Image: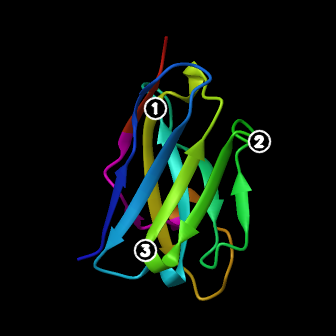
Amino acid sequence: QLQLVESGGGLVQPGGSLRLSCAASGFSLDYYAIGWFRQAPGKEREGVAYISSSGGSTNYADSVKGRFTISRDNAKNTVFLQMNSLKPEDTAIYYCAADREGIDIVVITTTQYDNWGQGTQVTVSS
């Protein structure tokens, strides 16, 4: 059974940092593009960061560029999202998702992702 499990969320003060992890079980992430998404109360889910299967290509939403970094360790079957300089508007449930691709590309279309984790809460507040 394919499963993605996010961890690393929590409560942090503005300006602080968190590192989210997305661990896969039941399948290898080697051939999957990965995306991190978030959904705040009353808002639509939005894409935050994306990475190709090799890790060689990444893409970020404008709102997080320069603050968030997506990376992956295929040997550990895990993808990470390092979040620095956090702002209250970053508060949301964060999800990772996987899309199997035959080529090494970044996938930024939410509807292409068909494997989703359960999410982890990130709260930025003083």
Mark 1 or 2: the one toward you:
2
Residue drawn 48% across and 15% down? 125
Is 117 part of what is drawn in magenta? yes
Query: Is 77 left or right of 82, judged from the image as shown?
Result: left
**According to the image, label 1 marks what residue?**
92
According to the picture, the residue beneath numbered tag 2 turns out to be 66
Which region of the structure is painted magenta? Answer: 112-120
> Which of the two discs, 2 and 3, labels the residue nearer the N terminus?
2
The residue pinned by badge 3 equals: 77
Q: Is residue 42 above or below residue 125?
A: below
Q: Amino acid at mark 3?
A: Asn
Kind of residue sitting beneath label 2:
Gly
Q: In which quadrant of the rendered view does residue 52 lie? A: bottom right
Residue at 56% x, 34% y: name it.
Answer: 17
Residue 90 position (above or below residue 3): above
Q: Secondary structure at mark 2?
A: loop
Q: CA distance from mark 2 to mark 3?
A: 25 Å
The image shows residue 109 at horizontal and vertical percentages of 61, 60
119 over 90 or under it: above or below:
below
Q: Position of residue 31 (x, y in %)?
A: 52, 84
Q: Which of the pair 110/104 is nearer the observer?
A: 104
What residue occupies the far top of the structure in this picture?
126
